[in-house]
């Protein structure tokens, strides 16, 4: 009997924990959709095409680009057990948090439970309660074989400290620390604490998704372009303008996006349009150098009328005086405090309940 009570308390406690965590992380209030990334640690040795299918990634090139794999990678390319693959997802903001927009769609298999789907198929990237919530399932124990479920993966379109970034749902390894994660992704521990609404490492939960902002390369893409905001993070590439243009981000290149003709067949146009810069002999990707400057014909976006915009971008390699920068924003999580207060209260109630019955 005592055991059952402890169990009830534990269950209550753990569902509360998940709710409080979900309230804080992956805050998303932006009006516009964006691209986001999710880290998936494959439980099995599998192929890149199985992962593409599981996550419903429409364009295989975007999966290859997010992992910096060559465009020629075959679909049976092996993903090892425990290997982490970055999954590109379209993100929408909804009710203050971000979710992968109506994808992946998972078809329920015999013996599946929502808990198994969340924790074993999607490796704890989301809580089963989120699947229950968005699919409006009243009783989580009642799901049917062949039923199709939307799996709302965590994401965000929010700027961080005024900068447009790509949010990465990093899957936390057992025993890792916020400082390690900050170092791994070129951000600061302070930013990660603030963004995830936690105060210290004891609030970092293993095998859950942790919001990591990835700095993106600066691009010349116009705001009215169909692919705006065009954000490509370090060491990844992205095909855009119906696959006509391939843009790569390399931090070592001063965080300047490098776009070239992709050389592959466009997805919905019969051919790729001209991509020559005005008043010049350069096409997208070409560069000329003068004594002090390099001029590049840069990709600047596209529209539905099969037009690709270009612009001449001059990068000065002359020595320049650097202006002092830095604008520390403050998304401080005051909410964190009241949640913790509730948390402790429940802890106490459970404690009293178990020991005085
Ligand atoms: C929106 O979030 C609140 C809690 O922040 C929750 O109570 C409510 O059910 C959510 N609404 C929808 C439609 O998911
Ligand atoms: C892993 O592979 C085994 C055997 O191939 C399969 O039964 C199992 O469902 C797979 N697990 C996941 C999570 O896909
Ligand atoms: C699942 O099956 C039950 C019983 O057969 C049925 O009442 C219910 O509508 C089904 N739910 C869905 C989502 O298909
Ligand atoms: C960018 O990616 C490269 C290759 O993975 C890595 O060596 C480098 O540390 C990264 N730089 C930043 C600032 O993230
Ligand atoms: C966070 O980073 C700062 C500077 O990089 C460092 O001084 C500080 O000790 C770190 N905090 C923790 C808790 O490690
Ligand atoms: C971590 O932060 C929470 C909330 O501020 C606090 O209650 C807890 O004591 C801290 N734990 C450690 C190990 O510092
Ligand atoms: C990004 O590029 C634009 C022009 O293309 C420039 O005005 C801006 O200063 C650049 N920002 C950074 C952070 O380099
Ligand atoms: C990056 O910028 C610095 C100065 O701003 C310059 O000295 C350097 O050559 C640039 N590197 C590249 C690869 O453009
Ligand atoms: C521009 O780049 C293309 C390949 O993308 C190359 O064939 C062409 O010769 C280059 N033109 C100039 C002027 O550099
Ligand atoms: C380099 O570019 C700047 C504008 O970005 C221009 O004012 C300057 O004259 C150029 N210098 C050379 C040597 O072309």
Image (tube, grey):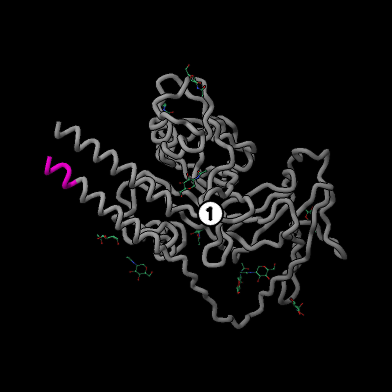
Stretch in magenta: 351-357
Q: Residues within 10 Å of mark 1 (few under 14, many from 20)?
A: many
Residue at numbered disc 1: 28
Query: Ligand 2 quadrant?
Result: top left
Instruction: Give the quarter of the image for residue 128.
Output: top left
Residue 44 visible? The answer is no
- In the image, is 316 to the left or to the right of 153? right
Residue at the spot 45% in from the left edge and 42% down from the top edge: 84
Residue at the spot 43% in from the left edge and 31% down from the top edge: 117
Badge 1 marks a residue whose secondary structure is loop
Residue in front for this viewpoint, 214 or 101:
101
**Residue 142 rendering spot, x and y as whole percentages:** 42, 24
- In the image, is 110 to the left or to the right of 277? left
Residue 90 visible? The answer is yes
Badge 1 residue CB within 8 Å of ligand 1: no
Residue at the spot 47% in from the left edge and 69% down from the top edge: 330
Q: Provide the major secondary structure of the magenta segment.
A: helix
**Residue 75 rendering spot, x and y as whole percentages:** 59, 31
Residue in front for this viewpoint, 122 or 352:
352
Residue at the spot 15% in from the left edge and 31% down from the top edge: 1
Question: Does 54 appear in magenta?
Answer: no
**Residue 340 rendering spot, x and y as whole percentages:** 31, 57
65 up-or-down from 54: above or below: below
Q: Quadrant of the C terminus?
A: top left
- In the image, is 34 to the left or to the right of 154? right
């Amino acid at each position: 009997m005592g055991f059952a009570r402890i169990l009830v308390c534990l269950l209550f406690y753990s569902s509360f924990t998940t709710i409080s965590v979900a309230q804080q992380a992956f805050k998303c209030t932006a009006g516009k959709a964006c691209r986001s990334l999710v880290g998936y640690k494959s439980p099995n040795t599998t192929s890149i095409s199985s992962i593409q299918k599981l996550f419903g990634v429409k364009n295989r090139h975007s999966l290859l680009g997010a992992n910096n794999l060559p465009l020629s990678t075959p679909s049976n390319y092996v993903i090892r057990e425990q290997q982490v693959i970055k999954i590109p997802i379209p993100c929408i903001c909804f009710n203050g948090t971000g979710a992968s927009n109506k994808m992946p769609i998972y078809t329920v298999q015999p013996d599946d439970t929502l808990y198994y789907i969340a924790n074993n198929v999607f490796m704890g990237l989301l809580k089963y309660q989120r699947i229950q919530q968005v699919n409006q399932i009243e009783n989580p124990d009642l799901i049917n074989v062949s039923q199709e479920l939307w799996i709302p993966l965590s994401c965000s379109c929010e700027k961080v400290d005024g900068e447009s970034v790509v949010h990465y749902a990093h899957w936390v390894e057992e025993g890792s620390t916020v400082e390690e994660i900050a170092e791994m992704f070129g951000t600061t521990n302070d930013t990660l604490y603030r963004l995830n609404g936690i105060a210290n490492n004891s609030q970092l939960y293993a095998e859950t998704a942790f919001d990591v902002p990835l700095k993106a390369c600066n691009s010349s893409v116009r705001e009215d372009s169909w692919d705006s905001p065009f954000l490509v993070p370090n060491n990844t590439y992205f095909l855009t303008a119906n696959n006509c243009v391939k843009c790569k981000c390399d931090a070592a290149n001063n965080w300047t996006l490098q776009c070239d003709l992709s050389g592959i067949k466009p997805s919905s146009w019969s051919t790729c349009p001209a991509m020559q810069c005005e008043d010049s002999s350069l096409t997208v990707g070409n560069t000329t150098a003068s004594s002090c400057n390099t001029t590049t014909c840069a990709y600047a976006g596209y529209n539905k009328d099969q037009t690709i915009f270009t612009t001449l971008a001059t990068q000065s390699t002359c020595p320049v005086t650097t202006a002092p920068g830095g604008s520390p924003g403050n998304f401080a999580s005051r909410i964190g405090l009241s949640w913790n207060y509730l948390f402790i209260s429940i802890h106490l109630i459970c404690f009293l309940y178990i020991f005085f019955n």
